[in-house]
Amino acid sequence: MPLMPLHLIIILTTINFITQKGCRILLTLYATNLGAGPLETGVMFALYGLFPFLLAVMAGRLADRFDNRLLMYWGLSTYTISLAIPFFLPNLSTLYWVAPIWSVTSMLWVVATQNLIGIISTKETRTQNFSFYSLGESLASIAGPIIVGVSIDYWSHLPTFLVLAAIPGLCTAIILFNRQRLPTPEIKPSVENHKQQLMDLLRLPAMRNALLTNAVVMAGLDLFNLYMPIYGHSLHFSATTIGLVMGAFGAAAFVTRTALPTLTKCWTEKTVLMGALAISGCVFIAIPFTASAPWLAFSAFLLGLGLGCGQPLSMVLAFNAGPPGRSAEALSVRLAVSYGAHVVVPPMFGVIGSLLGMAPIFWTCAVVMGSGAYLNYQPKNPPMQ
């Protein structure tokens, strides 16, 4: 029995997310192995986020105006090729220019697939379907780090790049054979919509809240994905152990995203986000006092419970806030904020780490999480409008 379009998209995104979640950890561990410190690695991740930050809105407009499948083909094929480059050019300078290619090409895939899920869904099923999408990302957050860690320990860093490149290559072949079953937008943007400015979206209160919350969540995710491997390396953990610690985050995100529809029925989205970010802030405070692998894995699990719900909720809010014919653009604005965090957060905290050590990085992130929790605080008796 052929798969429904929604099932096909979610399966493919889950498979491809294995590479996306794994390649950033591989990038960190390989750069560290080549002698890069926190500042150098932070700059590398800033480059990773810079070009998607600049191009995400343009990608969303292309998806709205033409065809999501165009972005999927272009993104995955180039992503596959660029992932294999470090195997043939194994040096630190290579990582500085392939990292932006990885991020841009994977961003094209994300914009297209998120928009397709929103198009397929109705208003009643959209939260559930985006939760399914996020569950696939959570599974990949478990599998990606573990695959990378085991592959590094058994085959070393360079063959692991080829292992990760094979995954989007497989997805590209599957899409080519199933391209007719992927839907296209029924509502095309009008000329007026095309001429509307980005500020039109940013004036929407729901969009602003989604973007600010997403920025806080992405700051936490960036610092965890970048500095937890470095912290584990400083404790002389093996790559497999680091992968298992990182995988605990994905396991927790899977749990919290499974429960997300129930949670949002019991409390408002803002209340759920406030509690999640408060938990995350407490965990970031505790991490520098934790030096054993089991306790770090437990900390990563708690952090996954907190940060795991932020992304799907901000996706739903961003899609719903977009006017007809501009849904992909609305999602891409959210992605631009995410990649903007990639640009600002790693080098800024890299400077902190180089000057003061690892602990202030995690404690500063705890302050950021607390600010996000305050942003989503809702008094029991809000003032009358």
Image (cartoon, helix red, strand yellow):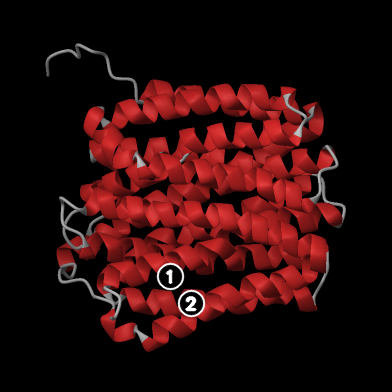
Q: Residue at x 38, y 59 (%)?
A: 57
Q: Mark 2 points at which residue?
A: 171
Q: Which residue is drawn at 52% across and 38% down?
A: 304
Residue 12 image label: 1
Q: Give whichever of 34, 341 is nearer the camera.
A: 34
Which one is earlier in the sequence, the residue at label 2 or at label 1?
A: 1
Task: Kindly state the secondary structure of the residue where label 2 is placed.
Answer: helix
Q: Can residue 77 be seen in this view?
A: no
**Label 1: how many residues lie within 10 Å, few (<14), some (14-19) or many (20+)?**
some
Where's residue 154, x and y in %? 81, 65
Total marks shown come to 2
Q: In this view, does 301 lie above or below 116?
A: above
Query: Disc 2 residue type?
Result: Cys
Residue 358 image label: none
From the viewer's perspective, tell me whether residue 247 is left or right of residue 4: right
Quadrant of the image occupied by residue 208:
top left
Quadrant of the image occupied by residue 13:
bottom left
Query: Disc 1 residue type?
Result: Leu
Q: Is residue 204 above or below residue 157?
A: above
Q: In this view, does 72 lie above or below 58?
A: below
